[in-house]
Image: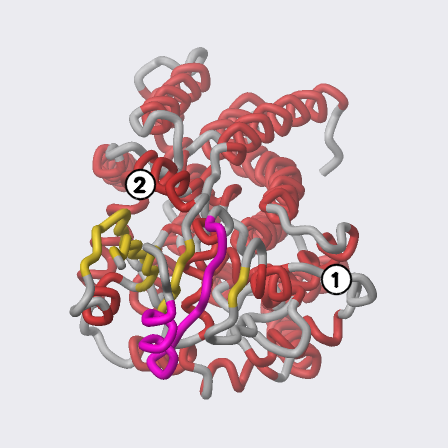
């Protein structure tokens, strides 16, 4: 689909608007989820997926974190290392290749902006493709623009743009795949379709394994459509294309099998998939996340509207089986599967399909407004509704989102570390990532484990801050006086009085 100059201008304005909001939120991002820090380590660290910690050594500044996060002189553009790190980890390599490339352009430095800028890059692609998909679906420029605005100003989307992981990138490939299916839903599948099918699936699967789930459901929907239309030759070639793409993928990234069957994440997913235990609980938790972050608590109301619309369609004996219903059912099926196999109940696993919910809800509300005679103003009513919902959702949290990790209490606490020495108790090297940001404000810090903790504690001549997971810290300091400075989640900081 070739965009007109006016459409390109409108999309450009949306991109600038969303990018401005993202940058505003990102300036307030004060901390990182541990996986965000691992993004830099897996992309840049040479020869290991864990930081190299020397217990008992006095560090200051970046210390071992710099070695883990940063591309040093002469180590840039080392894609063999990125590939090997991901083989040793549990994710495919494409996202980390891109992050390593960006960091290689800025050696000897570490910044949240490298990852956030990459998300903004994919946001531009998402804006264009989502508009094209929406326009193909609704056949209305204003509606398509409205869908893009509704989706991209939502808290759940902005949250994803601040999260320095591969979920913005994989969302782009999911939307690209959904657009490809829509484009050819009622057209004869040609060579271009099969080439794009293979390319998108390969790139999506090299970004995140969960891409396979939504690609399967969308592909199955297309297959059923081809069967109902008696387009068996196209179905046969599509199946062969999918199988061939799978073979090429395994030749490129044979570590998929090891990650699925031998890694801890793969074993967790398979174990969860083989039982129905926890399915309802997982669905409820994921529903609550979507309800809160995407629709500000109005998801049940929208679900009722969808049911009413389906009833009306059934009573009028109108066709229910079409691309839109296939997209909706594919998204719902993905959510059900991910609710069962995901290691955590978090919005990042839902992000690849949230756009589909916005399309369907917008379409249904739009059609209902048309039924009651508000066709002329339908788009303006819906856009104002969604912008109001998104603004309220953002304003209700003082214009912060979850992934900026802002905490007034933590911010105040960090200033107290500037002249302090810290003793950091960890059992494994990866646990050091929990404490990265506060330690950057400490005068110095020492990592200890079970073998070294006693000798290091005894050697401290002045008051110091003990840093650890809270439950461990209280055991370690059972014979010392300590004052709780800041405790949240996995982080515990205690002032020890010598």
Residue to which mark 2 is pinned: 317
**Which quadrant, please, contains the C terminus?**
bottom left
**Which quadrant, please, contains the N terminus?**
top right
Marks 2/1: CA distance?
66 Å
- Quick check: 283 left or right of 388? left
| Residue 467 position within the rendered picture, expressed as x and y whole percent measured from the top left | 34, 60
Magenta stretch containing residue 448, yes or no?
yes
- Marks 2 and 1 in Cβ contact (< 8 Å): no
On screen, residue 492 above or below 123: below
Residue to which mark 1 is pinned: 72
Residue drawn at 59 percent across, 65 percent down: 41
Q: Tell me where residue 269 sits by quadrant.
A: bottom left
Q: Nearer the viewer, residue 232 or 79?
A: 79
Q: Nearer the viewer, residue 412 or 206?
A: 412
| Residue 326 position within the rendered picture, expressed as x and y whole percent measured from the top left | 43, 53
Q: Tell me where residue 104 sits by quadrant.
A: bottom right
Q: Report helix, strand or loop for mark 2.
A: loop
What stretch of residues is rendered in magenta?
A: 442-459
Magenta stretch containing residue 38, yes or no?
no
Residue 321 tag number: none
**Which residue is at the far front?**
461
Q: Report helix, strand or loop for mark 1.
A: loop
Of tags 2 and 1, the one toward the viewer is 1
On screen, residue 304 above or below 69: above
- State the count of labels: 2
On screen, residue 131 above or below 322: above
- Quick check: 214 left or right of 116? left
| Dot 2 or dot 1, earlier in sequence | 1
Residue 226 at least partly seen: no
| Residue 134 position within the rendered picture, expressed as x and y whole percent measured from the top left | 54, 36
């Amino acid at each position: 689909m070739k965009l007109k100059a006016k459409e390109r201008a409108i999309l450009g304005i949306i991109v600038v608007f969303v990018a401005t909001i993202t940058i505003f939120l990102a300036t307030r991002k004060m901390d990182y989820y541990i996986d965000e820090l691992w993004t830099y380590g897996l992309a840049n660290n040479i020869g290991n997926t864990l930081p190299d910690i020397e217990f008992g050594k006095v560090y200051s500044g970046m210390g071992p974190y710099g070695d883990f996060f940063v591309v040093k002189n002469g180590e840039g553009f080392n894609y063999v290392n990125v590939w090997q790190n991901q083989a040793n980890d549990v994710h495919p390599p494409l996202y980390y290749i891109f992050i390593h490339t960006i960091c290689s352009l800025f050696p000897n430095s570490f910044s949240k902006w490298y990852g956030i800028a990459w998300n903004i890059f994919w946001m531009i692609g998402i804006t264009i493709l989502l508009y094209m998909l929406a326009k193909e679906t609704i056949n209305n420029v204003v509606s398509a623009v409205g869908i893009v605005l509704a989706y991209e100003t939502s808290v759940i989307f902005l949250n994803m743009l601040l999260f320095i992981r591969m979920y913005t990138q994989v969302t782009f490939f999911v939307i690209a795949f959904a657009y490809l299916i829509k484009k050819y839903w009622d057209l004869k599948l040609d060579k271009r379709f099969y080439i794009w099918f293979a390319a998108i699936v390969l790139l999506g699967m090299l970004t995140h394994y969960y891409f396979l789930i939504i690609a399967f459901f969308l592909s199955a929907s297309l297959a059923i459509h081809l069967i109902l239309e008696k387009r068996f030759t196209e179905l046969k070639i599509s199946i062969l294309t999918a199988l061939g793409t799978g073979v090429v993928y395994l030749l490129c990234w044979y570590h998929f099998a090891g990650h699925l069957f031998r890694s801890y994440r793969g074993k967790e997913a398979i174990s969860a998939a083989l039982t129905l235990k926890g399915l309802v609980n997982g669905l409820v938790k994921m529903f609550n996340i979507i309800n809160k972050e995407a629709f500000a608590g109005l998801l049940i109301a929208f679900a009722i509207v969808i049911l009413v619309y389906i009833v009306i369609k059934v009573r009028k004996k109108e066709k229910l089986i079409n691309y839109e219903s296939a997209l909706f059912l594919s998204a719902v099926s993905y959510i059900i599967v991910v609710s069962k196999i995901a290691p955590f109940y978090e919005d990042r696993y839902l992000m690849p399909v949230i756009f589909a919910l916005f399309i369907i809800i917008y379409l249904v509300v739009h059609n209902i407004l048309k039924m009651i005679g508000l066709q002329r103003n339908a788009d303006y009513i819906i856009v104002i509704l969604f912008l109001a919902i998104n603004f309220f959702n953002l304003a209700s949290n003082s214009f912060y989102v979850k992934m900026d990790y802002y905490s007034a209490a933590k911010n105040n606490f960090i200033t107290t570390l500037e002249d302090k020495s810290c003793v950091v108790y960890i059992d494994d090297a990866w646990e050091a990532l929990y404490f990265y940001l506060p330690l950057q404000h400490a005068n110095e810090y020492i990592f200890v484990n079970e073998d070294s903790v006693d000798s290091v504690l005894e050697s401290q001549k002045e008051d110091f801050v003990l840093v650890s997971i809270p439950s461990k810290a209280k055991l370690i300091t059972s014979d010392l006086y300590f004052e709780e400075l800041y405790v949240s989640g996995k982080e515990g900081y205690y002032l020890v009085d010598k």
